[in-house]
Amino acid sequence: RRIPALVAHISHTEAVACMPVHFPDISTENGQIARCSSHPSSTAPNKKDVLVYTIDDFQSRGVCKTLWSFATLRIRPEPGILDRLMERALRTVEKFKAHDVATFLWSLSVLGIQPDAKVFDSLMSRFREIAHTFQHKSLSMVIWSIASLGLRAELRMLHAWKQRCRSEMQNMEGRDISMVLGALASLDMKGCKELAVQLSERATSMTSKFVASDWVDTTWAQAKLGVQPDPAYVNALKANLAEMVQGFRAAEMAKMTWALSALKVDLTPRCSAVLMRRAAQTISSAEPDDIARLMTAFVSLELTPDERLREEVMRRATSKMHQFPPSCLASLIWAIASLNAEPSLHFLQAFYKQAVEMQPYFTPPELCQLFLAFAKLRLMPDQSLVSALVAQIVTMLASFTQQQTADVIWAMTALKVPVPQEVASRQSKDATKTRLKAVTHFCFPAVAKDLRGSSEVHAARPCKHDFPGAGQDKVLHVRHNRRVSLDIVPPRKSRASTSHRHQRNSIEILPSADRRINLGEGLGTRPSV
């Protein structure tokens, strides 16, 4: 019996344009879906040729194929038809085969339809029952669909999936591997690190068959999961990067650039130039998350956008500013400050307005990013924004770490913003050392450069932050005597060769009367030396 693959609300012309063969006229009436018998597209069908089926007549395969047809044509079914399909799926789910489960979930993910709890639980139960029959393609479709829909599968289902995935790993091709790795990274599954490493090793042997999307998903997943790729994979990536980037869209550009920065891939000048050029070409269609991710990646990769790219970023960010969530707002302004870019007036106006609206949702790391960025750019925001952000800091003060508190106080001091008593009183007895760490983020590199040219700051332990790029690889030596000193150590290749040749220079910062560090009037002035 031929199962009709039918869709609602498609005209004959649209159907013929979408399908590789002549597709008959389709109509719906009273919850019924009708299919005409085959006929030339130029002739109208006869009523006697019309076969009408109700959804209640569909078997399991018919339900899956009908939903697959909607997904393939990217047409969302009417609520009435969708509800009937879901009801029928519940009644026939015990007859679903492996391909049916995978197809049904894939169709839901493509259409962006969230299944209700009963449907999803039934599908997961059916998966556990027939997990041993799943092949590699169906396995990748299932886990990718669950991740795309943002659903949380039960542990028993995930355990069965991982066991079957290990059995089918040797049969997986490039697209299967990239889909599975991307899904694992999106789901943030516990206990999947070993599986991700095995999949990455398999990916290294399949790079010759990778297309651009496979490179993006695999590299991004490795960076997100903290899996260090094989050197052979990195070499193949760098060899193909310049060519594959030409077909990237904005989202793919952002994901790949962020992954390269997270994996600390050493790019060639040619690859860097190609990335910057393609970023300028695609930024006009970027979403807020793509813009923020791209700019922070440039900071980590130490790539300086040219004037054209900076203008395109400002223009696109300004037009999409009303959609920026708090995390993207903070990351974007911090990246702009770190790249020493000059934000436009229209950008700042839109940014201030959106930041005021998002004020209740900023977290401590994001508040730190905002104030440090304002201080770095020497920008004094609107009084309404400053008041809103300071109020948010006071509200969330219990969640601030000592380092975050020190950074906020330092930035407020640089901006001449009054520090609330609640914030100032939270300083620990070791506040001097903590405040000096904050100074190194913005003031100290300039001081070190003035004194030694290309000096490098070494430290007893790294200054760690909850936001990217701040204070990395810069450490501080502090001696708690009457005076607090910052030690500048020149670059060294080995301890044996430099310990007896170079002398250590100290910048002594005198504490003020209230035992706090005098940070000067602003970012442009150095501390008392």
Image (cartoon, rainbow, N blue to C red):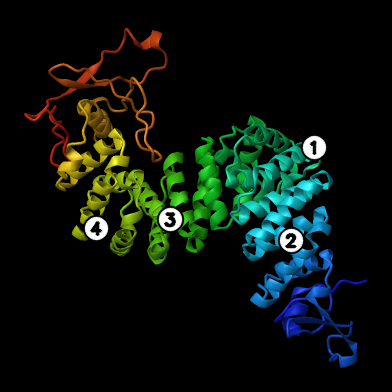
Foreground tag (3 vs 4): 4
SS class, disc 3: helix
Nearest to N terminus: mark 3 or mark 1: 1
**Mark 1 falls on what kind of element?**
helix
- Residue at image mark 3: 309
x and y, in percent, of residue 345 in the image: 28, 62
| Residue type, numbered disc 1 | Ser
Q: CA distance from mark 4 to mark 1?
A: 56 Å
Which mark sits nearer the N-terminus, 4 or 1? 1
Amino acid found under the numbered disc labelled 4: Leu
Query: Are the residues flagged by discs 4 and 1 in contact, CB closer than 8 Å?
Result: no
Cα separation, mark 2 vs mark 4, equals 48 Å
Q: The C terminus appears in which quarter of the rendering?
A: top left
Please give the residue where the numbered disc 2 appears in the rendered image.
104
The amino acid type of the residue labelled 2 equals: Phe
Instruction: Tell me the crowding category of disc 2: few under 14, some 14 to 19, or many 20 or more residues within 10 angstroms, Cα based.
Output: many
> Can you give x and y, in whole percent of width and height, for residue 91 in the image?
78, 65
Question: To which residue does mark 4 refer?
Answer: 385
- Which SS class for mark 4? helix
Mark pair 3, 1: CA separation = 47 Å
Rounded to the nearest whole Å, what is the CA distance between mark 2 and mark 1? Answer: 23 Å
| Residue contact at pointers 2 and 1, CB within 8 angstroms | no
- The residue sitting at 22% across, 17% down in the picture is 479
Residue 437 pos. (x, y %): 27, 30
